[in-house]
Amino acid sequence: MRSPPGGCDDLLAACPDAIAELRKLLDRHLRSRPTDYLATYLDLLAVNEQYHWSAVVGDFSDDFYVIACPHCAAEVTIAIGGYGRCSAIRDRQLGDVDRRDLRPASPEDLSVAGRWMHATAVRDGQDHLAEGIVHLFGQAECPC
């Protein structure tokens, strides 16, 4: 259950009771620590209208996120996983230029959505996911 295609928002809005029940079922399933934890977690994000996070969060085994630096507009790659927890400028010929360690956010300083994402992962013993989330919402440093 990822971001609904155009025009489906009205359909979801017309079914608040069904959505609330689905939310409870998904949350109960997460608490059972299923083998499909991440897929269910992402579905619960979507049910909670966190469509962006539902679409982009991975398992943090080797995830890469490309963002624009708010100061210089350089394209910065954020890596979270087996490659490390860092930011860098990626160059086709040189590889990563000037890697910098990510500074994780404090769980207390996360946005409302981030706090919920982190707290749910911690509650369910998903330490790797919880650690990835604080790095995802943490401080990246632009090498420029």
Image: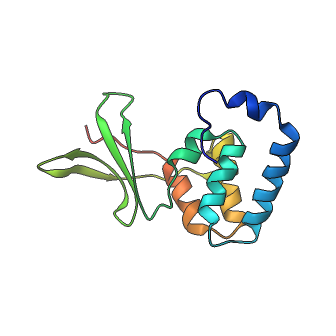
| Closer to us: 6 or 99 | 6
Residue at image position (54%, 45%) is: 55
Q: Is residue 67 visible?
A: yes
Q: Can residue 108 be seen in this view?
A: no
Residue at image position (78%, 31%) is: 13
Where residue 137 appears, x then y in whole percent? 53, 46
Residue at image position (57%, 44%) is: 53
Where residue 19 appears, x then y in whole percent? 80, 44
The answer to whether residue 132 is left or right of residue 86 is right
In which quadrant of the rendered view does residue 85 lie?
bottom left
Residue at image position (23%, 46%) is: 90
Where residue 20 appears, x then y in whole percent? 84, 45
| Closer to us: 4 or 53 | 4
The answer to whether residue 127 is left or right of residue 32 is left
Is 143 rendered above or below residue 124? above
The answer to whether residue 21 is left or right of residue 112 is right
Where residue 81 appears, x then y in whole percent? 41, 63
What colouring style does the render use?
rainbow
| Closer to us: 19 or 37 | 19
Q: Please, which residue is most extreme toward the left here?
A: 93
Q: Please, which residue is most extreme toward the right here?
A: 17
Is 129 rendered above or below residue 49? below
